[in-house]
Amino acid sequence: MREHKGSVDVVGLGTERKTKQESRSLPGYLRVSLSLLALSCLCSSASAQSEADVRNKVQASGYSDSGVTEKIQDSGLTPEQVRQKLKDSGYNPDALDQYMPGGTAGKPTTPATSQPVPTEGPQEPEIARPPAPGQSPAPRPELTPASFPEFTKEILKRVPATAPVLPFGYEIFHYAPSTFEPLATGPVDPDYPIGPGDEVVVTVWGDNQYTHAAVVSREATISVPDIGQIVLNGLTLEQAKRLITDRLAMVYSGIRARRPSTFVDVALGKLRTIQVFILGDVDRPGGYTISSVSTVLNALYNAGGPTARGSMRDVRIIRHNQLFRRVDLYGYILTGSRAEDVRLQSGDVVFIPPIGKTIAILGEVHRPAIYEVRPEERFHELLRLSGGVLTTALLDRMQIDRIIPFSERDSLRGMDRVALDMPLRAILADSTQDPELLDRDIIQIFRIGDVRKNTVTISGAVIFHPGTFQIKRGMRVSDLVEAAGGFTSDSYMDRAVLVRTAPDLSQSIHRFNLAKAVAKDPEHDLELEELDAVYVASVWDIRDRHSVQISGNVRKPGTYDYLDGMTIMDLIFASGGLKESASKLEAEVSRVDSATIATTKGARIYKAPISEDYGIHSQDSSFVLQEYDQVFVREIPDWELQRNVTITGEVKYPGVYSLNSKDERLSSLLTRAGGLKAEAYPRAATFTRAKGDAGRLAVDIESVAKHHNHRNDLTLEAGDLISIPKEPKTVKVTGEVGSPSSVLYERGQAI
């Protein structure tokens, strides 16, 4: 194909001139697609063409399915418009349906879902491919108890206390395949084998300069200016670079000069694609078109990885009908080594056989799971796969739940399953003691106990460093208190408690005097035993903290700790002092006498003198408070700050006025404001009251201002707003009149 101005010539058609004339009326993308599909066949017997036939013709042209799909999407036409264009040009309108959105091109097929179309003659196999760029197969559904592998379900039945144990390694294939696709750009390693379809870019610079790109032909050759055809069959990139450089050195002497003046670089441009088959126990078996740099892992990710029945340790690469390599995926998962990650070639078959011998190991190991082990591997190798035992493992024994092999069941009638206890300590210490593993063994590594027996504890808020301590021979209470840093001065010294735990876990209590214990009195300084627990209380743990309260006209009313010798002025001072509105003559004290409360059923009330003088020689020193006293500081009768009202508009002195009495009225305010101006219009005056969110009041201010009407002469409240507008000089006429407008007002003039 030769490319000119973004279009591709139509070749390979029986009626070339007719097709070229028709192609002028089609968009460029359709001309490309029709060329690729060899439409002479599609026109004559389009109804007999299967999807496989159309796809095979595309593959023979050298274009990928995704390339055709991308060109159709870039055209911006809908599927209906594409079909109409094909029909108008005389082609089968359904020829490109598989390449439209939702079509089957590029989707992998499986034996369970693909239905072959019977055709005459030999057919090429249906090739399943990875999703188009930007698309990924639906991820595997999340595992649920119903979808657990059968061995996992069996373990849950036999060891109910354990968490679900799943086959090891399969979860890495649950991610989207695009996460593990090889890079489409970037350098290619020198060992990459060059093959038909690869683009080789030769760059020469220095005394001679040019860049030449050539696609390797089917015969594995390229043509390079000045040196002609070069055969690259079977060469790696490094070998091809050396060969091309040697050939160019025969033409350009500057390449091999002592001081080179001409330089050569050989790199790869676009890489070819290859076809591989992934078969056996995989999630999506079938044929796949993948990048030529893809490895076994890349291919398996596209196919969804092995199923739970497929082997992870015996992945077979079949090349030229012979077993080429066996790959153990555990090496990659456990160590990150890609030594066995083979690069695939076109035509390779990746075969996943059924899983081999499987062993479950659970309990105190780093990676509890179900592992596939090779026939020659034994217990120590299984421990390596599981990461080894944890430090919390019980070394006295491990247990194997085993199914008796067929060959031994005749001699052990009625014993299809057995439990085998083995000394884990001896097995770990002696590598020669390596138990044999049988298929479906369930190995349990048990956990040591959580109880520490060589300890004693001490607790209590008064202990400086409470906690758990190692018990030592002959250790007593005084030794434990000393190890814990001692205790605070508010400790209750007359009684402390020791709780002792017997071997059968029953507990008993022992009392001692803490003061005598720290003084090493043998009767109270008890000798400690394992798991003893000592508790030391504070005096405030068994006694109420006394308080007093103050409320009323102080800055910080509330509850305060009672202090011995506290006076009423001490409490007022602690509460921030008196407010300006406080009555500074006396306060009221409510007191409860605990000795007489049962008979009096009430509190006693006292009047105590107070003042604004907070000096230590104030007269309040004679009144001393008691526990639970409540002090009330009253407000000065009728005390309040200025109350302001506002009058605006047509009065002589508008502004804010402070009320001079509690019952000042509207008429008084109008008088203080100088009365109404001549242009005032009191009929439209408004009276708004903020107190209680009353809002606008219906008050006839005109009657108050002009006639001193007492009924509308309201008593003013703080926040009142009176607004008196000017008298309007116009009358607005609207509605069903010839010329709606505003006219001058004339007194006595009728409508």
Image: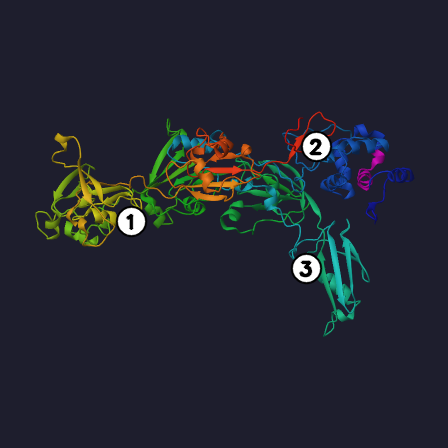
* Residue sticking out furthest to the top: 736
Q: Is residue 357 visible?
A: yes
Disc 1 residue type (three-letter): Gly
x and y, in percent, of residue 50 in the image: 76, 31
Rendered position, 564 above or below 725: below
Which of the marked residues, 2 or 3, is nearer the chain's N terminus?
3
What residue sits right under mark 2 in the picture?
741
Disc 2 residue type (three-letter): Ser
Disc 2 versus disc 3: nearer the observer = 2
Measure the alpha-carbon separation of dots 2 and 3. 98 Å
Picture residue at 14% right of the left edge, 33% below the top: 597
Which of the marked residues, 2 or 1, is nearer the chain's N terminus?
1
Q: Pointer 1: residues within 10 angstroms few (<14), some, or many (20+)?
A: few
- Name the element at disc 3: helix
x and y, in percent, of residue 308 in the image: 52, 35
What residue sits right under mark 1 in the picture?
576
User: Does the magenta run of residues contain 243?
Assistant: no
What residue span does the magenta drawing correspond to? 28-41
Side of 646 where 91 appears, left or right = right
Side of 732 where 534 appears, left or right = left
What residue sits right under mark 3 in the picture?
238
Considering depth in this image, is 201 or 501 the residue closer to the camera?
501
State yes or no: discs 2 and 1 in contact (Cβ < 8 Å): no
User: Does the magenta run of residues contain 30?
Assistant: yes
Q: Quadrant of the C terminus?
A: top right
Magenta stretch, overall SS: helix
